Image: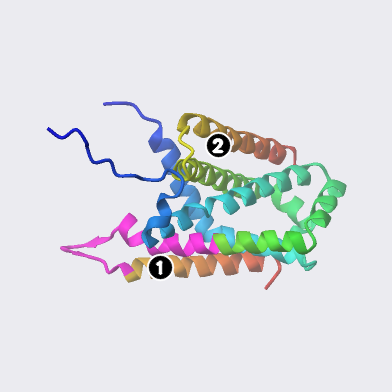
């Protein structure tokens, strides 16, 4: 009987460095940090908006500048990365069956990208950017 | 059948992720413009206050902000575990508590507008 059972050594803190697939998994997971920070910023925004014009103007003034730009650029980059990853797995998350066959994944992904484009344009138009 | 609260948090995660995929980039873009000093019209006090004063605006803001929060909270819980912090019960309480407080603060602020 074996007295030396094989124990595979797995680092709890660095396991994802072993394989590019794990790295890609972690890169998707960490998008929650900038998105969560953005959500908290939006909570502050609504709170400040409810306090009146002076509070809101001070809030938006504080958000101007290079550091804020850097933060927003990071949030925008991670949010876009999350969006593309999210849409690219939709055929696996919700396959569409038509008769015996499954609808080709590219139509499901394409439909999501189309809705994304429309939603983006609608928000930009409503915000007065377009 | 064993009871689990996982479906609740997971569905909030999935709904929030979908909403974030569609809307987070463009909303971040609006704030990016603000940081550059080219604030979109919507982010002026008058426009945004009018939007938030309407019931649709309230519902939109509450839905977007809280689902972003619960999406990030659930994913952050898993991410902490993956980075080696194995105190899942404690992490879960903290992240869901922050999301819960954020939800309440947002709802109360919107009701005041």
Q: Residue A103 in magenta?
A: yes
x%, y% of residue A106?
33, 71
Marks counted in the figure total 2
Q: Quadrant of residue B2?
A: top left
The residue at the point 51 percent across, 63 percent down is: A81
The residue at the point 85 percent across, 49 percent down is: A53
| Range shown magenta | A79-105
Q: Is residue B98 left or right of residue B1?
A: right
Q: Is residue A110 above or below residue A44?
A: below
Q: Nearer the viewer, residue B79 or B111?
A: B79
Which disc, if any, is residue B95?
2
Q: The C terminus of chain A lies in which quarter of the figure?
A: bottom right
The residue at the point 68 percent across, 36 percent down is: B105
Q: Chain of mark 1?
A: A
Which disc, if any, is residue A111?
1
Q: Nearer the viewer, residue A74 or B43?
A: A74
SS for callout 1: helix
Q: Is residue A52 left or right of residue B56?
A: right
Q: Is residue A97 above or below residue B63?
A: below
SS for callout 2: helix
Badge 2: few (under 14), some or many (20 or more) residues near its Cα, within 10 Å?
some
x%, y% of residue A18?
38, 56
x%, y% of residue A48?
77, 45
């Amino acid at each position: 009987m074996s007295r030396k059972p094989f124990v595979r050594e797995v680092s709890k803190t660095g396991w994802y460095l072993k394989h590019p697939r794990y790295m890609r998994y972690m890169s998707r997971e960490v998008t929650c940090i900038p998105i969560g920070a953005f959500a908290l910023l939006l909570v502050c925004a609504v709170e400040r908006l409810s306090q009146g014009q002076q509070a809101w103007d001070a809030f938006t003034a504080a958000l101007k500048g290079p550091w804020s730009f850097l933060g927003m650029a990071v949030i925008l980059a991670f949010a876009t990365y999350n969006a593309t990853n999210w849409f690219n797995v939709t055929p696996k998350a919700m396959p569409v069956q038509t008769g015996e066959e499954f609808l080709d994944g590219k139509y499901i992904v394409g439909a999501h990208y189309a809705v994304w484009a429309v939603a983006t344009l609608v928000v930009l138009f409503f915000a007065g950017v377009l | 059948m064993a009871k689990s609260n996982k479906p609740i948090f997971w569905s909030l995660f999935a709904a929030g992720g979908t909403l974030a995929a569609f809307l987070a980039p463009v909303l971040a873009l609006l704030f990016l413009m603000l940081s550059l000093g080219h604030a979109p019209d919507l982010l002026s006090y008058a426009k945004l206050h009018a939007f938030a004063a309407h019931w649709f605006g309230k519902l939109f803001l509450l839905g977007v902000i809280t689902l972003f929060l619960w999406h990030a909270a659930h994913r952050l819980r898993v991410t902490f575990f993956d980075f080696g912090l194995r105190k899942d019960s404690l992490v879960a309480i903290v992240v869901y508590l922050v999301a819960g407080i954020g939800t309440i603060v947002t709802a109360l602020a919107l009701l005041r507008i």
